[in-house]
Structures are given as structure tokens and as C-alpha cells.
Amino acid sequence: MVAVNLWSGLRAFADGKDVVEVDAKNVGEVLEGLVKAHPGLEHVIEAGVSVAVDGKVIASGLTNEVKPDSEVYLMQQLKGG
């Protein structure tokens, strides 16, 4: 299981939890696991989020590996110019 830290605005969609555990081996499976466990997160994830794994923001790599002891954060996707 991988512990995923959520930003405060998502906690309402995850039963008030700030950390949710999912069974995943890569970033794509983390996102799928979050939606499966907490369907209310689907619209946010589909709109676009950033995922940080062990301090590195994963821009577009859904196949990037995560390990059970990885530090994973789901973050708002930053946009601008």
C-alpha cells in the first residue's frame, strides 16, 4: 500500500482524511486507486493534478514507479504563464 497525501480541499471527497492508502506500483495506479476508493475525487483528477513522488514532481509519467515507502503527494496542478 502507498500512502497518498491530499491537499486540504480534497479531504471532503476522502471522508475527511488527509492521507489515503492505495495499492499501486506506479503513478497511474495511484490515481486509479484514489478514484476507486473515493469516487468523489474523479472530477478533480480528470481536471488535472500534479503528483510528487519522493520530492520530485511527476509531470506526465503515469508509469513512474512508486514504492510502499514512497512519499506521495497529490497537488493542485499549477497553470499560468
Image (cartoon, rainbow, N blue to C red):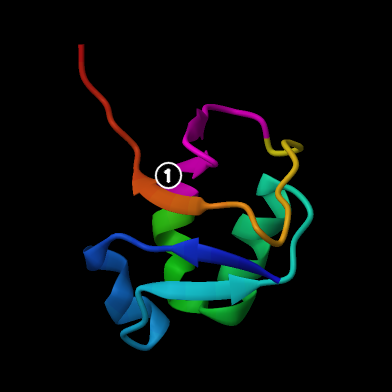
Residue at the (47%, 36%) spot, across then down: 55
Magenta stretch: give its range. Answer: 46-61
Residue reaching furthest to the bottom: 15
Q: Position of residue 49 (x, y in %)?
A: 42, 44
Quarter of the N terminus within the rendering? bottom right
Residue reaching furthest to the top: 81
**Label 1: which residue?**
49
Q: Quadrant of residue 62?
A: top right
Q: Position of residue 23 (x, y in %)?
A: 74, 70
**Is disc 1 placed on a helix, strand or loop?**
strand
Residue at the (21%, 19%) spot, across then down: 80
In-front residue for pair 31/18: 18
Q: Position of residue 16 (x, y in %)?
A: 31, 85
Number of marks drawn: 1
In this rendering, position of residue 8 left or right of residue 1 = left
Q: Quadrant of residue 41?
A: bottom left
Query: Does the magenta segment cover residue 77?
Result: no
Quarter of the C terminus within the rendering? top left
Query: Does the magenta segment cover residue 51?
Result: yes
Residue reaching furthest to the front: 69
Disc 1 marks a residue whose amino acid type is: Val
Give the answer, above or below, for where 52 lies relative to 59: below
In-front residue for pair 50/48: 50
Give the answer, above or below, for where 18 lies relative to 71: below
